[in-house]
Amino acid sequence: PNGGNREQGTGNRMKTEQEIDKPLKIAVAADLEGVDFLSQFSYAQLADGYNGIGPGVLKPGIRAKVSEFLHIFAPAALGHDLRNELSDGTRRRFQAANDEFYRNCLRLADYHYAADKRRRRRARAVAQVLYGFVSAESFGWRAWQEAKERHAAKLASGNSVWNKKEEQ
């Protein structure tokens, strides 16, 4: 989970309202951290910031497969992607976004597999791997820095969902 709707040519398309609504509803039902943070954005902003599961550099077909395989973590990815989209470039917020993502992945494992200890344990192990991936210096930190620059460019363009005061 990093980035959002990438620049032209990278193949990541903006998500539909339906693709945003499902993970958002699960985030509320599972009592994830950051739901209040997400509630301040319009669907257009959520769709621009959310890319599914995996890094922004994944080809669309690969991202679709990864997102399908790890679908239970989509609500955590939504929150993480929006935190990434609005990156301030600081280590403190980078770590906080990753820690929130990890806690939310653990909650989602518990939410989806409450009655199945074996599957819940496996899902929690996957959450640990995802956390390591998003926190990695060579990947996560670099993506956090790039997101700050990318978002600033969107704002500077003056023609972005982030420049518009839309109905929330």
Image: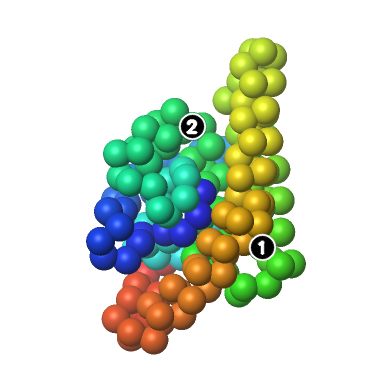
| Residue found 53% across the figure and 61% down from its top | 143
Q: Is residue 28 visible?
A: no
Residue 164, position as x, y percentages in the image: 35, 79
Task: Identify residue type, mark 2.
Answer: Leu
Residue 159, position as x, y percentages in the image: 29, 81
Horizontal placement of 33 versus 78: left or right? Answer: right
- Mark 1: give few (<14), some (14-19) or many (20+) Cα within 10 Å: many
- Give the vertical position of 65 relative to 13 (above or below): above
List the residue tagged with mark 1: 94
Residue 80, position as x, y percentages in the image: 56, 54
Quadrant for residue 119, please give it.
top right
Q: Earlier in the sequence, mark 1 or mark 2?
A: 2
Quadrant for residue 19, please give it.
top left
| Residue found 42% across the figure and 54% down from its top | 56
- Mark 2: give few (<14), some (14-19) or many (20+) Cα within 10 Å: some
* Mark number, residue 70: 2
- Give the vertical position of 85 relative to 157 (above or below): above
| Residue found 27% across the figure and 53% down from its top | 11
How far, Cα to Cα, is label 1 from label 2? 22 Å
Residue 153, position as x, y percentages in the image: 40, 80
Task: Identify residue type, mark 1.
Answer: Phe
| Residue found 60% across the figure and 50% down from its top | 134
Q: Is residue 59 visible?
A: yes
Nearer-the-camera pick, 111 or 55: 55
- Give the vertical position of 42 relative to 14 (above or below): below
